[in-house]
Amino acid sequence: MSNNTVGSSGPAPGKIRGPGRPPKRTCTWCAESKTPLKYVLPTENGKKEFCSETCLSEFRQAYSKGACLHCDNVIRGNAPSSSKNFCSTYCLNKYQKKNEKRTSSPQSGNGANGTENHANNNSTGSFYDIYQAFDWNEYMKDTNSVAASQECFKQAPMPPVNDFKVGMKLEALDPRNLTSTCIATVVGVLGPRLRLRLDGSDNKNDFWRLVDAGDIHPIGHCERNDGMLQPPLGFRMNASSWPMFLLKTLNGAEMAPAKVFQPEPPTPKSNVFVVGQKLEAVDKKNPQLICCATVGAVKNDQIHVTFDGWRGAFDYWCRYDSRDIFPVGWCARAGHPLQPPGQKSATTPSRFKLRPSGMPNPALPEGGSTGAGNSNTSVTPTPVATVCLRIRSSCTGGSSSLPTSVLGTGPSGAAEALVKELLSVHPDPQRLTRAILTASSSYSNITNVQVSSGNKNYSVKVPTELTLDELKNWLKAVTSGVGSCIGMIEIDTGEAAGRPCTLCGESTSNNNVTSGVKRPNNEESPANSVNGSGECSSGKLARVSPERPE
């Protein structure tokens, strides 16, 4: 958010000002005091100011790995070895003294213990174990709000895969002059988004696009459509030098291949947004940020986007089919950071915040126990039955070492069985665990699954209490997260056997997917097992159907 509406940040740690002199505003990351602090990052404990996008990005990456429990600063390499939750011994001692005072109060019963448990939970985990995702479920429950449905947005149901690399060149419309097609360079990648810079322009006019945007194309698209590449608005050189500049720019450059461009999603037929619905939206003043937002008003083809916790300085109107608005949970599925709501007053300090996925889940409300015989339990859309997952090993990203089917008790059991099987054969387990974590981060109920792969043990978070529709979405998120075809794994509804993939044109038949691999042909496959014959055991399996038609 813009620094025009926020107060100044404190001095950098270790800097001491003379008596009577006010503290100088410094960049939170590099401590630079001479450069204007134009970039602001809202956090759960306030706002951090930065001198550049680079500093903001570096801080955000470090902050996502963990923040000091006392001062909310990032934890650098010089942190005390006795605790991984503090940036310095000073903060550690201060925090311990504060906790000692709290122990005298009956309401502070497990404060110190809670801190110790938090440290234990995270100290042995990897970076991905403390990946932070905003808890939308808790937030919407406490604010008594609902999310706008997927049908409202011009966004793919599953965020597209981003295979672009920094330095690649492509063609893009000049956002300040939409009649001009220019050469752009990828200068940043964040989830499915690209930060682009028009060649011949400066870094003050960078802009962001999704990988499935309709106004970016491979080099040569303009010429094939009888167009001509133009210099960007504000071209820094003489206009007559543009042809030579273009030639030098493209000579030896890395062109983005056509396969990394994703098809643009369809446009909704009409504006079906309703006032009060929740969504995720780009902050136009700081377009690298996506924040929690609400539909404030609806007028014809326009909606008014208001940012939760901010006083209107960043709100804007946009079309209902804008590519800058997203359904709730999009950031979690895409692996993109989501800014939590700002703090409207001191009476609501940080109730709705980023919750590390390695921390315990919020307790179930009264009557929400999942114990047997409880008449107040949540309604499960489908009965517990054996679920069969079909795997098309010959789809994009597949492997002949994969099984052709996986069985599990219920949707969650199938997800857990699939994770164990995939991790045991996947060539890049770390990438797979990242994809699974990202796919699972939007679910409130998760469990840790321990899997051994090679000589390493992995603790992977898998959602529980899944419905069939949720399982389908989770499968798409996992496969897209590892760069595979999203149709590679699907729920067998009794009609999937041998059916070709609608995206790859591949099949699940044995001749296509098990070439060169000999697997045991078990007549009976128990729940949570793998069937290598390519068929879910007919007669042994209770078939299930999706809750809603595709």
Image (cartoon, rainbow, N blue to C red):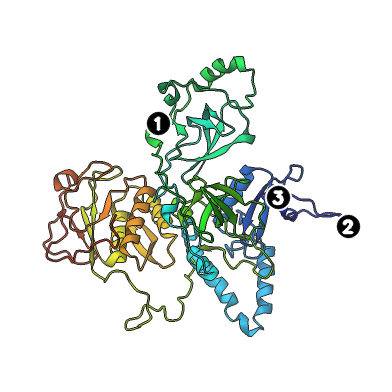
Q: Tell me which corner region of the image, top left, top right, bottom left or bottom right, holds residue 312.
A: bottom right
Disc 1/disc 3 C-alpha distance (Å): 39 Å
x then y, percent, for residue 268: 42, 47
The amino acid pointed to by label 1 is Pro
Q: Position of residue 7 (x, y in %)?
A: 74, 55
Residue 516 in the figure: left or right of residue 210: left
Disc 3 residue type?
Answer: Asn
| Residue 20, numbered label | 2
- Of pointers 3 and 2, the one earlier in the residue sequence: 3
Q: Nearer the viewer, mark 1 or mark 3?
A: 3
For the residues labelled 1 and 2, the Cα–Cα distance comes to: 60 Å
C-alpha span from label 3 to label 2: 25 Å
Nearest-to-viewer mark from 3 and 2: 3
Question: What amino acid type should be assigned to the residue bearing mark 2?
Answer: Gly
Count residues near mark 1 (Cα–Cα under 10 Å), then give few for <14, some for 14-19, many for 20+.
some
Mark 1 or mark 3, earlier in chain:
3
Above or below, 173 against 432 in this view is: above
Q: Secondary structure at mark 2?
A: loop
Which residue is denoted by mark 1 in the rendering?
257
Relative height, residue 242 to residue 196 (above, below): above
**Residue sitting at x 51%, y 22%:** 229
**Residue at image mark 3:** 3
Q: Secondary structure at mark 1?
A: loop
